[in-house]
Image (cartoon, rainbow, N blue to C red):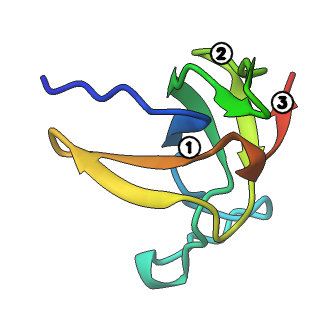
Amino acid sequence: MASIKPLSDRVLVRPDSAEEKTSSGIIIPDSAKEKPQRGTVVAVGEGKYEDGKKIGMSLKKGDKVLYGKYSGTEIEIDGEELMIMREADILGILS
């Protein structure tokens, strides 16, 4: 399996699967499914430098996160769909 280490303040996220049916039980066809906005952090970069000082990452591997609808770049590694985005694109950590 290939691995990827995000650079700088980037984060690699495994999106949650799209909802298969609504809360009332209606099955959603593939063409109508919305892109998920939640996922699990798979890897994080080292942090970024600002004014000569290193700013560490506030996220860690395994965190469940919420991100913007159009955030990040979709990539595929060994047949698995992942997203890579800046830490600033993460809206919050789910608990």
Give the residue number, with chain letter if any, for mark 3. Answer: 94
Q: Earlier in the sequence, mark 2 or mark 1?
A: 1
Q: Is residue 83 above or below residue 14?
A: below
Instruction: Please state if 88 lies on the left or on the right of 84 as rendered.
Output: right
At label 1, counting other C-alpha atoms closer than 10 Å, the crowd grade (few under 14, some 14-19, many 20 or more) is some
**Percent x, y for residue 36?**
61, 58
Specify the amino acid type for callout 3: Leu
Q: Name the residue nearer the viewer: 40 or 8.
A: 8
Give the quarter of the image for residue 49.
top right
- Residue 16 — which label? 1
Task: Name the front one of labels 2 and 1.
Answer: 2
**Percent x, y for residue 27?**
57, 70
Q: Earlier in the sequence, mark 1 or mark 3?
A: 1
Instruction: Please state if 46 lies on the left or on the right of 69 as rendered.
Output: left
Residue shown at 18% from the left, 45% from the top: 79
Specify the amino acid type for callout 2: Lys
Element marked by disc 1: loop
Give the quarter of the image for residue 4.
top left
Q: CA distance from mark 1 to mark 3?
A: 13 Å
Instruction: Please state if 69 lies on the left or on the right of 18 as rendered.
Output: right
Q: Is residue 31 above or below residue 42?
A: below
Q: Is residue 10 above or below residue 45?
A: below
**Percent x, y for residue 72?**
55, 58
Give the residue number, with chain letter if any, for mark 2. Answer: 60
Q: CA distance from mark 2 to mark 1?
A: 17 Å
